[in-house]
Amino acid sequence: MKKLLLLVVMLFGISCLGFGADNSLKNVQKNGKMIVGLDATFAPMGFRDENDEIVGFDIDLAKEVAKRMGVQVEFKPCEWDGILFDLKGKKIDMVWNGMTMTDARKKQALFSEPYFEDGQMIFSKKENKINKVSELEGKIVGLQLGSSADIAVQKNAIFGKIKEVKKYGTNVEALMDLEAGRLDAVVVDAVNGKYYNSKKNALAYSEESLTTEYYGVAFRKGDKALRDEVQKNIDEMKKDGTYDQIVAKWFGK
């Protein structure tokens, strides 16, 4: 009986000290800002404009959520291949930058509900257009290291038939090498590839995609309070029409 009482007292003491408590939302409110990690080359979700300002679809969403939460937002560019390590290391509070919700990532992070649908598509030179995944056989293919494209290509049956897979720090580097003729194709998020090509119209994209994917905001596993507050505000934005206004701004009606 004495041991049981001692255990109860110890547990009560730990609870009072706040060990194990989820202070994620309180910490953001106390700091007066939330820090969002992103790859600042991933247009139109989050990228630098001609004035070196970070802008984009996800940027506008995050700014509006922060405004509704009564805090500021700081955008912190990170290397995409290590961005979840930055999240776990508390260098950022969340990843909000077109992050595909994969099973592997769900083991490492706590996600919001899906807020955007996309997929991995094949981009190629117009004169050598690749329409189908099977046509990647024998080709030199570029993609971003650690990206959803990287995962999608490795999981696809075509992987063993590709001549060479070249991995880049950013999608922009891969697409530029494609334009320069150093690659036969690039596998990239459709929204990113199409936005890049809209500025130059030098590339073609496939009729067939490798995947259908959903983007989510990633948080640390224990940060449920912060995740729920962000999700609540996204839901409210969808109900009051703000989300649709931001969609129209970046993608048209």
Image: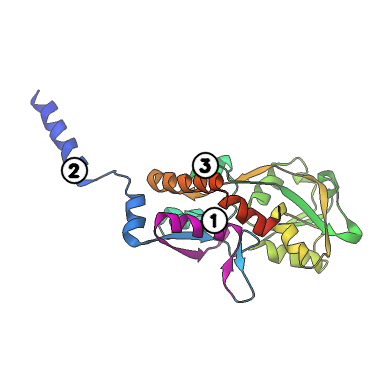
- Check disc 2 and give the amino acid type: Cys
Q: Residues within 10 Å of mark 3 (few under 14, many from 20)?
A: some
Q: Nearer the viewer, residue 61 or 44?
A: 61
Specify whether residue 185 is in view. Answer: yes
Return the residue at label 3: 106
Give residue 225's quadrant in the image: top left
Which numbered mark, 1 or 3, is in the foreground of this view? Answer: 1
Return the residue at label 2: 16
- Check disc 3 and give the amino acid type: Lys
Q: Nearer the viewer, residue 13 or 160?
A: 13
Task: Point out the stretch of residues depicted in magenta.
Answer: 52-81
- Measured in 3D between alpha carbons, the distance from the residue under mark 1 to the one under mark 2, in whole angstroms, is 36 Å
**SS label for mark 2:** helix
Q: Is residue 154 left or right of residue 106?
A: right
Q: Residue at x 15, y 37 (%)?
A: 10
Q: Residue at x 13, y 35 (%)?
A: 9
Q: Are marks 2 and 3 in contact (CB under 8 Å)?
A: no
- Measured in 3D between alpha carbons, the distance from the residue under mark 1 to the one under mark 3, in whole angstroms, is 22 Å
Return the residue at label 1: 61
Q: Nearer the viewer, residue 6 or 75?
A: 75
Most extreme residue toward the front is 240
